[in-house]
Image: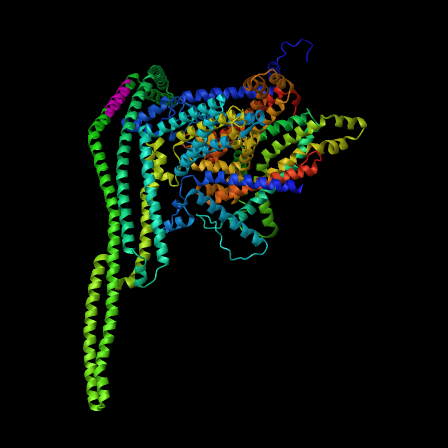
Amino acid sequence: MLSYIIRRLFQMALTLWIVSVLSFLIVALAPGDPLASQLDPKKTPADLERRRDEIGYDDPVVKKYTDFYSRFFSDFGAVISKQFGGGDNYSWQLTSETSKEAVLPTMWRKMLVTLPLVIVNTLLVWSLSFPIGIYSALRRNTFQDRTITVLSYTLIAFPGFWISILIIGFVTKTLGIPIVSPETIGVELEGPRSFFDRTWHIAIPAFVGALTGVATLTRYVKGQMMEVMGQDYIRTAKAKGLDDDQVYYKHALRPASLPFITMLAGLLPSIFGGSVVFEAIYSWPGLGRWVFEAVFQRDIYIVMTSLFVGSALTLIGILVSDILLSVADPRVRLS
Amino acid sequence: MSDQPRKSSSPLADALRLFVRNKPALISFIAIVLLGVAAVSGSLFVGRKADASDLIRMEEASLVGDRFKSEVIKNAVLDPHQPELKDTFLPPNSQSSVDLNKTYWLGTDNLGRDVLARLWAGSSISLTIGFLAVGISVFLGISLGGIAGYFGRNRVGLPMFATLMLFLAWGVMLAAGISTPAWICFTVGALLFAFQFLLSVAGQRWRTVGFFTFAALLFGAISWFNWRTENQTPEGAVHQAALDTHRQARELLLDLRDAGREFKEFEEAAPDNITHLLEQKDLPAWIYRRQFGIEVKTRLLDLQVGRFEIRKFRSALLEAQRLHQEQQERAEHLESFAEDYKIRHEQAVKDEQAATARAQDFFRSGKNDEGRTASLEAANHAARASTFDPAELKKRTKRMREIGAARQKYVEAVMAALEEPLSQRVAALDKADQDLAALLEADVKDAAGMREAQFNLEAVVRGWKRAEADFKEAEGAKRLEALGPIVEALAKGSREDAGLADLQAEQKRLTAAQEGLKAAAKTAAEDVAKLKTIQGEPPEESKKSLPLLKVQGSNDLMDRRGQLRTRFVIRFDTEAKNSLTTLRGAELLSGQYRYGVYRITSHFLTATFLYLLLAVAALALMASGQASITDTKLPVKGLFLPTITVDDLVMRFTEIMMTIPVIFLILAILAIFEKDVFITMGVIGLTSWMGTTRFVRAEILSLREQDFVQAARSLGLSDFRIIWRHLVPNAISPVLVSASIGVAGAVLAESTLSFLGIGAKPEQTTWGQILSEGREYIFDAPWLTWIPGVAILITVLSFNLLGEGLREAFNPKLRGR
């Protein structure tokens, strides 16, 4: 087990290195100048040139690459050492060119904004789709099953942004409740009222975002469930006279839910890029929107950092889900 | 199943029967066919040439006035771009206030454009995008997955792999504009290639030789294509000139940066005494040389710019000529409507007469209100009749032609007239160029001269110092001399004499010192004058002002660099990227592209796709063992031992691509390019192939082990035959299913990106774009969001259901899942 993990970590490092080169090629070789958007009239061209020298704008490609990653890992080390009570007088090396903020701390802050949305979204998806999927599989070819199937197809086809703007239109106009942004702007709320305000603001984007997820996962759960139900040992269990609940929930559901452990791998990076569209529509100042804006302001450090961190999270997610799968399923051997 | 014997037992027929029985899938299929028909017919009826930009239209309008503009647009039966501000925000199923015969079935938007027309035009773009994006991803998925599945166990020699990677890196770097590393990659790759080629010839592996030749030919063809696009067209020439200029400006910039760095180091080490400064050897010469070199290079660059302008002017003239020819074609196009005009005209005349008659009847019978309405209608019809007058059309087209011809003649005349002066100017520029180059050479010589002068300066200073020392020595001697009488007097013991001698000595000493000082001042003044002539600054003053000067100098240098960047680098950066496709409107739009984007869209896309094709073909041939030289009988066999299995190669790459967060990847790539829906399509296709690759590989792996494939192999069939006759027919159905669902995903992705405002150009009407425009008017005109939304919903739903239907039809076991 340990040797497997070590080997996997080594492979991950190699993959990450290739990913870093690829993402660097895509992002850093793009045309455009982060200082071109510099509109500060106090800055003379000479100042801009000095700044260009500082960030190594004219440097050769390889130097740019090594510079970026040495800065990134130095900052990353500082983040880690701060977690363990390290010194506070570290000067961040990666800073955004437009907002002058340090990239990694800002990323952490933005992630905290996005996190509630993603958590509620994920909870909704996973807690709704399993019961619905199992229900639909157990009542195969009934009216309920067909309704669920038709509904899930329709929901998969729904453009999320469209339903969002319809709902925003409806709620803000007819009900008169503001739902855009994480909390009501311009109103100071305290205690439970603030809590409910925030809940209400999370609920709608999370719910709309979950619609497609619920539909997809429901269909997947149903498919898995039905495949297992068709197996011989289920028939045997039924023939033995076990009661239905025991057959369904003990003998069928357990093997049927194994493949979903693999899907857990996607949860970790979904904190990262899962909600660009919804953050843009509901104007959440979260991670997705931050990167979205950075891409168009040529804020290379932000884009590269997020690509790298996102890829690393994906790899970690895959590793964790593989290990979990081997724990849950004795048939899977790690080698 | 019924009792009747089955008519056909072929699996395809079975699948068809199952599919037809599946009602939702059948309905979706019909819906998709209808959509396809709408998409095709839409692009036929829109009556707008694909590449006809709004600029051409505006030009036409300016030729014959606004009336003509609205005519031209009206002739296009359904133009999604037709703004009719009078009819803004009409709800669905309402009548136009401009043309009484026209009904807006789906309403109008904020510019009064017909939503139905826009939807129609959008269907064409959205479906094209969906199909092409899926085409790309399915192509990549099938080929990579198939290679990994079928040839997975073969091993590829690392030199081969390295060659491929080096050539790919070369292409990517060239596209990104980094030339030196690109050419290093190319050279190393070519050497490796030649080495392997020779080895395979020596080892008499003729299939490998054939593969190498084929790859070289394909590569040559692609390079030739690139070269032709970049050099042989007028736009290409401009592009090349811009690239040249940009390269030069960039070199100059880097030169300046180095100068700045040296200066900074110097500044940091700055002492505030002149001796130290002088120890820095040739400071003034260095500054002078740097400044002069930069001056000369800047002027060279200016010359280059002049040449660039000339080339651009020429190309613009050619473009103008092309435009006028297009105008002639448009006139012909307009003429083809003559029959239509005639019919409409006659109809309008008839309508007018009928309406007039009705109006007269109404007035006679005293129904004044109805009469007025009818007469208004008659007037309207009369207007229409005059609009569609065939004679008018003839006149108009004739005029158009005349104008077009005249303009063309004018352009030709301008070209003829300017050809000579232009070439003269180019010659003059060439000469100036040479002169400047000579100057630059002279500068190098000058530098040598300066160094000599520097030596002289140092010699003078040394002389000065020696003079100072001499002066000190002399003073000491004089003092001794002056002290002589005192000593003598002291020896004599006479107090009075001593006092007198003392005074005398003191006086003498003073005069001598005065003289010495005078002489010293004289030499110093001479030295200063000498220094002045050489250095331009007296050393005494420099003592104080030089550090200050240095700071200022560094500032100046940076300033200069900034100016240079704005003057040449940024300009030619954009110019080089813009010139290929958008010579026409680049000047108008340049403000929009502050951040810089690659606008050589079509060229870049074609090159990328060709390279992809090459890479896939090479990989396939390499994997199939045609090109492997690992088992060659040569003694150097050991050289090729490092190998990697094809499966590893392909699947590791797939995993790497799956690791990068797709949405950020798409955003990052889209930010590089000018907004264009076809770029979006390419990006969606290039980022969505990984799933297909994985399951095609799994499918092929399982098929490969089945008995019929083993049997085919034991019969000695070739790989090619096994793949085409046995594997592909069996593996095609899941691919079809995933393609169908993929189209749904691509349509959704495209509309999402367009909705975010990064997918399509403003003039490219896609459903996502209509939705995003309608978002602002969600309360005033809800149909603007509902209609495109429902259209997307139906399309995506249809493709999903079709995919599911296909899956069930091909695999009846899965029914009801």
| Residue A217, position as x, y percentages in the image | 63, 33
Reply yes or no: does residue B399 show up in magenta. Answer: yes
Q: Quadrant of residue B59?
A: top left
Query: Can see residue A205?
Result: yes
- Towards the viewer: B741 or B76: B741
Query: Can see residue A283?
Result: no
Reply yes or no: does residue A194 show up in magenta. Answer: no
The image shows residue B378, relative to residue B191, as above or below, that is above
Q: Quadrant of residue A273?
A: top right
The image shows residue B76, relative to residue B266, as above or below, that is above
For the magenta stretch, what is the residue range? Answer: B394-408
Per the picture, the main secondary structure of the magenta-coloured stretch is helix
Residue drawn at x 37%, y 39% is: B592
Q: Is residue B132 left or right of residue B570?
A: right
Farthest right residue in view: A241
Q: Is residue B464 left or right of residue B616?
A: left
- Towards the viewer: B480 or B645: B480
| Residue B446, position as x, y percentages in the image | 24, 49
Tell me the quadrant of the picture where the N terminus of chain B can be found: top right
The image shows residue B481, relative to residue B740, as above or below, that is below
Q: Quadrant of residue B642?
A: top right
- Towards the viewer: B140 or B35: B140
| Residue A79, position as x, y percentages in the image | 55, 51
Tell me the quadrant of the picture where the C terminus of chain B can be found: top right
Residue drawn at x 29%, y 55% is: B282
| Residue B292, position as x, y percentages in the image | 26, 48
